[in-house]
Image: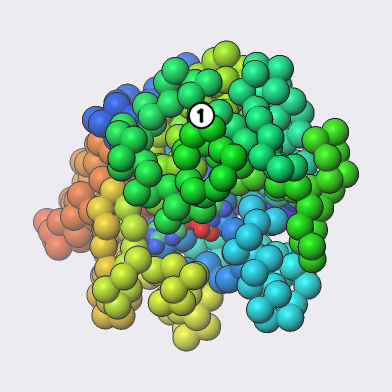
Amino acid sequence: MRSWSVPEVPSLGDLGLGDGPAVHVHDTSAGEARPVDPQDQARLYVCGITPYDATHMGHAATYLTFDLLQRAWRDRGLDVVYTQNVTDVDDPLLERAQATGVDWVELAERETQLFREDMTALRIIPPAHYVGAVESIDLVVALVQRLESAGAVYRVDDDLYFDVHADPGFGLVSGLDEDQMLTIFPQRGGDPDRAGKKHPLDCLLWQAERPDDPAWDSALGRGRPGWHIECAAIALEHLGTAFDVQGGGSDLVFPHHEMSASEATVATGEAFARTYVHAGMVGYEGEKMSKSKGNLVLVSKLRADGHDPMAIRLALLAHHYRSDWEWFGDEITAAEARLARWRDAVGRTVAPSGTAVLEQIRAAMADDLDAPAALAAVDAWVANDDAEDPQAGRTVRTAIDALLGVAL
Ligand code: 5CA
Ligand code: ZN
């Protein structure tokens, strides 16, 4: 699938400013921050959109999180291989297409295109591999066959299920106990009560054709992929096993990331990801912002209302990625004021030394992507008019561009 255009990312190293520090991020499965500092290459998978509605501020916050991770890794001198999927066939998409009388393929294409435009405007670095579920059906089928060989698949009517207990490590991503899993599973697409399942938590791998639903011929019968196996198959194909970070919003910890990890581990005999990183949920009007509830603040609407995408980005950066937070309309006004102050300050011909603030931004971002601390460091530099260094504006502008992705 076509990705989107790459923003210019200046290299601080090339400017003689050295490499950034090793990056630490909170690993959900370990329950603590861990260094993620591979040798030469960092491999990242982030769960992409289900394209049935436009990009909202919650999506933007999640993709911004992994953009910051990528920028910190690059500053460290690492080459980043980034893969992201598009769930371009799944129940919510098909239901929305049917309810609105739109062809599901057209709906997915239209919303994916809008997402690309929003990501480009926000200067989010695109994945090298942007991969749809539909174009990956052969990969899914092959992975299900590997699970069959491992004895981890069974049939309920014509549907295929994964026996989660084929993985002795099932539960290690989320750290939830079975009661907690059973509470969450039905809220996030699971079907614990389906008759014929061996265990209520077993998840769907392949769904046999239903009337009026799209389906593909395959060695598994005519049908379509389940959700978790889609990400397992795409990640394994484009990153291999034991890649560095599996990312997404915290709503994906269970069952999605737990199931994908178990499926991949049982099929390959190796670890799926080394680290699991999750962004908090953005709310609006007292509830999680979600396409299904419709309480959305759309990136495209903010842009159409004339808000500078860099101010949208700054508004998101004001919240730590791991916190759950609620969007209030006045945040964009505060971000616009901050953007104006920063633009004015980097234009000064002499300013306080820029290298000190660069090191503060680097340290903040390497410490679990602490963007609010980085903003505070820039604010302090902006407020200080103890001028001495004619190069300072340039250094700070470049640091903000490279590490925070804000073009001033
Ligand atoms: N296609 C699947 C992942 S394979 C999916 O969850 N799609 S989505 O469109 O519902 O969400 C896309 C990404 O945005 C996911 O990483 C999800 O965790 C994240 N996300 C969704 N809602 C919010 C929110 N309110 N706040 C923060 N992140 C969110
Ligand atoms: Zn996913």
On screen, residue 387 above or below 10:
below
Tell me if residue 369 can be seen: yes
On screen, residue 52 above or below 33:
below
- Residue that extends furthest to the bottom in the rendered view of this protein: 305
Query: Closer to the camera, 273 or 7?
Result: 273
- Residue that extends furthest to the top in the rendered view of this protein: 269
Quadrant in the picture for residue 240: top right
Tell me if residue 242 can be seen: no
Q: Indicate yes or no: mark 1 CB to ligand 2 under 8 Å.
A: no
Residue type marked 1: Val
Q: Which residue is mark 1?
A: 164
Give the residue at x 74% y 68%: 104
Query: Closer to the camera, 40 or 105?
Result: 105
Crowding at label 1, few (<14), some or many (≥20) Cα neighbours within 10 Å?
many
Residue 380 as seen in the image, left or right of residue 95: left
Residue 96 as seen in the image, left or right of residue 326: right
Residue 18: x percent and y percent? 37, 28
SS at mark 1? helix
Quadrant in the picture for residue 234: top right
Q: The C terminus lies in which quarter of the figure? A: bottom left
- Residue that extends furthest to the right in the rendered view of this protein: 217
Quadrant in the picture for residue 264: top right
Give the residue at x 74% y 81%: 101
Query: Closer to the camera, 318 or 244?
Result: 244
Residue 212 as seen in the image, left or right of residue 150: right
Residue 157: x percent and y percent? 71, 43
Residue 128: x percent and y percent? 65, 41
Give the residue at x 52% y 36%: 202
Give the residue at x 27% y 57%: 324
Residue 319: x percent and y percent? 26, 58
